[in-house]
Image (cartoon, grey):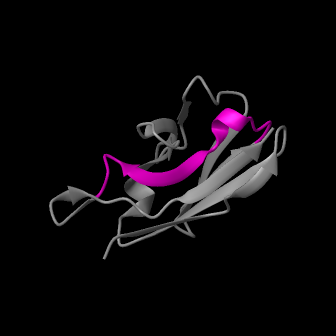
Amino acid sequence: QVQLVESGGGLVQTGGSLRLSCAASGIAFSLKTMAWYRQAPGKQREFIALIRRSGGTMYADSVTGRFTISRDNVKNTVYLQMNSLKPEDTAAYYCNAVPPEIVSGMDYWGKGTLVTVSS
């Protein structure tokens, strides 16, 4: 059974930091490229960062230099260290494999974790 459980969100002031975690189960985690996405109210979900099984990373321009993705293949967990947070980073954050896991014929997504950055 596929499960992706995001955690670590919260309320933080502009310029602050948060570290998000995503615990995965039911997937071959160490073989997967994993990614973080976010969805702000009224907007489409957008790509933030990915990490390949080799450890190579890629970031959206909006977070380059501020966010760092990492993974622990023993704990089956992917992390997102977010520094210098801005109000426009406010969103629900989700992790997933690339491409997304399929459950019952549909892309599977966890519940996400909410990040709110106050100005």
Question: Residue visible at 69% across and 49% down?
Answer: 116
Would residue 26 appear left or right of 74 to someone viewing this image?
left
Residue 17 seen in this snapshot: no
Residue 87 seen in this snapshot: yes
Determine if the magenta segment contains residue 74.
no
Q: Which quarter of the rendered picture does the N terminus lie within?
A: bottom left
Question: Residue visible at 67% across and 62% down?
Answer: 8
Question: Residue visible at 73% across and 33% down?
Answer: 66
- Give the quarter of the image for residue 29: bottom left
Above or below, comparing residue 79 to residue 26 in the picture: above
The answer to which of 60 and 117 lies nearer the viewer is 117
Residue 100: % across, % down: 32, 51
Question: Residue visible at 39% across and 55% down?
Answer: 31
Q: Which quarter of the rendered picture does the C terminus lie within?
A: top right
Residue 71: % across, % down: 58, 54
Residue 95: % across, % down: 48, 53
Determine if the magenta segment contains residue 84.
yes
